[in-house]
C-alpha cells in the first residue's frame, strides 16, 4: 500500500519538474570502511568536480557519508533515476551528512526503517521529495537555518518522529511534509511563507503538510506565513491551540478538515487582522496573546499584566462555554528582555538551598526570562571570569506568569 501510494505521489509530482539528481548520466563505485558507495559525477546542475551519492551498500549501523569520493566533492545525496529507491541501505541506524552536501534529494533516505538519528549540517539548503519518508524509527530532527525548502512528503509517515526543530531560513513546507508523524507541538518560524496542502482525485483526502498527526496539540505559526493550503492540518484530532504571530494567512475551513473544531482555539497577536474567516470555524482569542513554555516539566502561561483584569480561565470545550477559573496555578515572575547585551548572563540569587535556573521563552520574537518569585532575586552580568553580578532588572516589560500544575491535556486558556 505504501509503495503504491508513493508511486502515485511521484506521478503527480513529476508534472512539477524532475529532481536535479535525475539528470546524472553515469555512476561508479567507491569502497571505504563503511561499505560500497555508488556515485555519479555531476553535470550542469552543480559545479565541476562534484558528485552525487546514488547508493550505499554496507554493514549498516552508524554511518558517516564521505565528503569526497575519488577527488570529487559530495554535494548531493539522491537517486540515479526517478524510480530508483533505497539510496541508503535500510540497515543504517544513524547517519552523519558531511558539510559538503547542499542538497538531500528525492528518496535519499526513503524507507530506512532502522534509522533513529540523522545529523543535517548547515550546508544543506534543500530537503527534497520523500527524502526521509517511511523512516519509522526516526524520533528527532533538527533542520538547520541553512535549509530553505522542505519538500513534499519529506518526513511523511515517520510515525515515531515526535520532535522537529525547523530552522529560521525555511520558507516553504511542502505537501505531506510531516504527515502521520507523532509530533505533539511544532513551531513554524517567521521565515516560512507557505504551509503546503491541496487535494487530489487520486488519493483519498488532502495533501496537508501535517495531515494525520494524531498527537499534534499545539502549533505556533510565525508572522511570515501568508498562505496555508487546503487540508494542512487534516485528521489532527488532538489539535487545540494555534498561536499566530502575524496577520491571518490565506486559508479556508478545509485546513481543519476532520478535526475536532469545537476544541480548537486560535490565539492572535494584538493589532493583527483578517481573523473573521477563522472565527467562523474555530474559536478566536485576541489580545493578550498567551505565551506557552515549560518550567520544571510543567506547562507555563505568561502574558502582559496591563489592559486586563488578569483572571485566568481554562476550558476543555470552549464552544460549550464551560470556562472555569484556574485555582491551582503557581505564580512566577517574568520580564521581557528588550535591552540586554548579547553577552549577558543571568542567575537567581537565593537565601539558601538549591537555586533553580531561570527559564527563557519568547513573546512576539523577543526573549522573555521567567523565574520563581519566592525567595529569589534575578541578577545579570556581562562576564563570568570576573563576574559583575548586579540585581538591576534587565529592562523591558514585566509579565505575569502561572505554572499550571494539573490542567487536562486538552485544556485551552483565556483571560477574562
Image: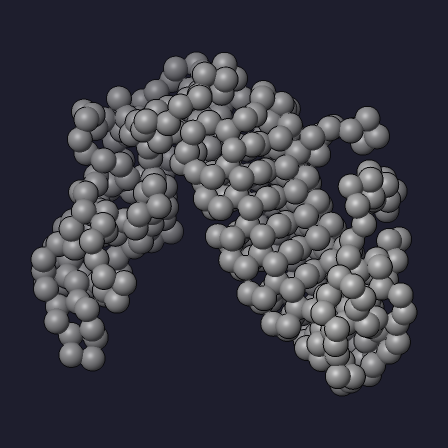
Q: Is residue 262 above or below residue 227?
A: above
Q: Name the quadrant containing residue 403.
A: top left
* Quarter in which the N terminus is drawn: top right
Pick the front one: 318 or 364: 364
Pick the front one: 49 or 305: 49
At a point 70% along the width and 53% down the height, the residue shown is: 128
Left or right: 294, with 186 as reference point:
left
Residue 25 in view of the camera? yes
Q: Name the quadrant containing residue 66.
A: bottom right
Residue 270 location in percent, x, y?
A: 31, 28
Residue 88 location in percent, x, y?
A: 78, 66
* Quarter in which the C terminus is drawn: top left
Q: Number of numbered discs present?
A: 0
At a point 34% along the width and 20% down the height, the residue shown is: 323
Residue 2 in view of the camera? no
Pick the front one: 331 or 246: 246
Pick the front one: 23 or 412: 23
Q: How is the image coloured?
A: one colour
Left or right: 40, with 125 as reference point:
right
Residue 102 location in percent, x, y?
A: 65, 64
Q: Is residue 388 above or below residue 329?
A: below
At a point 18% along the width and 42% down the height, the residue shown is: 398
Left or right: 49, with 194 as reference point:
right
At a point 15% along the width and 74% down the height, the residue shown is: 387
Residue 143 location in percent, x, y?
A: 56, 57
Amino acid at each position: 500500500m505504501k509503495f503504491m501510494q508513493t508511486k502515485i505521489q511521484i506521478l503527480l509530482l513529476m508534472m512539477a519538474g524532475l529532481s536535479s539528481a535525475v539528470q546524472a548520466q553515469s555512476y561508479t563505485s567507491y569502497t571505504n570502511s563503511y561499505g560500497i558507495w555508488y556515485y555519479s559525477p555531476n553535470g550542469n546542475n552543480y559545479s565541476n568536480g562534484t558528485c552525487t551519492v546514488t547508493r550505499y551498500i554496507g554493514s549498516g549501523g552508524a554511518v558517516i557519508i564521505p565528503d569526497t569520493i575519488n577527488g570529487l566533492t559530495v554535494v548531493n545525496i539522491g537517486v540515479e533515476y526517478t524510480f530508483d529507491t533505497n539510496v541508503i541501505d535500510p540497515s543504517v541506524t544513524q547517519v552523519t551528512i558531511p558539510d559538503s552536501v547542499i542538497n538531500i534529494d528525492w528518496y535519499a533516505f526513503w524507507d530506512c526503517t532502522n534509522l533513529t538519528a540523522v545529523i543535517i549540517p548547515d550546508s544543506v539548503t534543500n530537503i527534497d521529495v520523500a527524502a526521509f519518508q517511511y523512516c519509522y524509527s526516526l524520533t528527532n530532527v533538527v533542520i538547520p537555518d541553512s535549509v530553505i525548502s522542505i519538500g513534499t512528503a519529506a518526513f511523511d509517515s515517520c510515525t515515531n518522529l515526535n520532535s522537529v526543530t525547523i530552522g529560521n531560513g525555511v520558507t516553504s513546507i511542502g505537501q505531506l511534509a510531516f504527515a502521520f508523524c507523532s509530533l505533539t507541538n511544532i513551531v513554524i518560524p517567521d521565515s516560512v511563507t507557505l504551509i503546503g496542502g491541496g487535494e487530489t482525485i487520486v488519493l483519498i483526502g488532502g495533501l496537508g503538510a501535517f495531515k494525520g498527526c494524531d498527537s499534534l496539540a499545539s502549533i505556533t505559526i510565525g508572522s511570515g506565513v501568508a498562505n496555508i493550503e487546503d487540508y494542512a492540518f487534516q485528521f489532527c484530532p488532538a489539535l487545540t491551540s494555534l498561536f499566530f504571530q502575524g496577520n491571518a494567512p490565506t486559508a479556508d475551513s478545509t485546513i481543519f478538515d476532520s478535526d475536532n473544531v469545537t476544541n480548537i482555539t486560535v490565539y492572535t497577536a494584538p493589532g493583527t487582522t483578517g481573523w473573521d474567516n477563522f472565527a467562523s470555524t474555530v474559536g478566536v482569542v485576541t489580545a493578550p496573546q498567551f505565551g506557552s513554555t515549560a518550567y520544571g516539566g510543567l506547562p507555563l502561561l505568561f502574558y502582559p499584566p496591563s489592559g486586563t483584569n488578569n483572571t485566568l480561565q481554562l476550558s476543555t470545550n470552549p464552544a460549550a462555554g464551560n470556562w472555569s477559573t484556574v485555582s491551582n496555578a503557581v505564580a512566577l515572575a517574568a520580564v521581557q528582555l528588550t535591552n540586554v547585551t548579547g553577552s549577558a548572563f543571568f542567575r537567581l540569587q537565593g537565601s539558601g538551598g538549591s537555586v533553580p535556573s531561570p527559564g527563557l521563552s519568547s513573546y512576539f520574537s523577543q526573549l522573555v526570562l521567567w523565574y520563581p518569585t519566592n525567595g529569589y532575586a534575578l541578577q545579570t552580568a556581562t562576564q563570568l571570569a570576573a563576574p559583575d553580578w548586579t540585581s538591576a532588572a534587565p529592562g523591558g516589560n514585566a509579565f505575569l506568569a502561572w505554572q499550571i500544575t494539573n490542567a487536562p491535556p486538552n485544556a485551552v486558556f483565556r483571560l477574562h
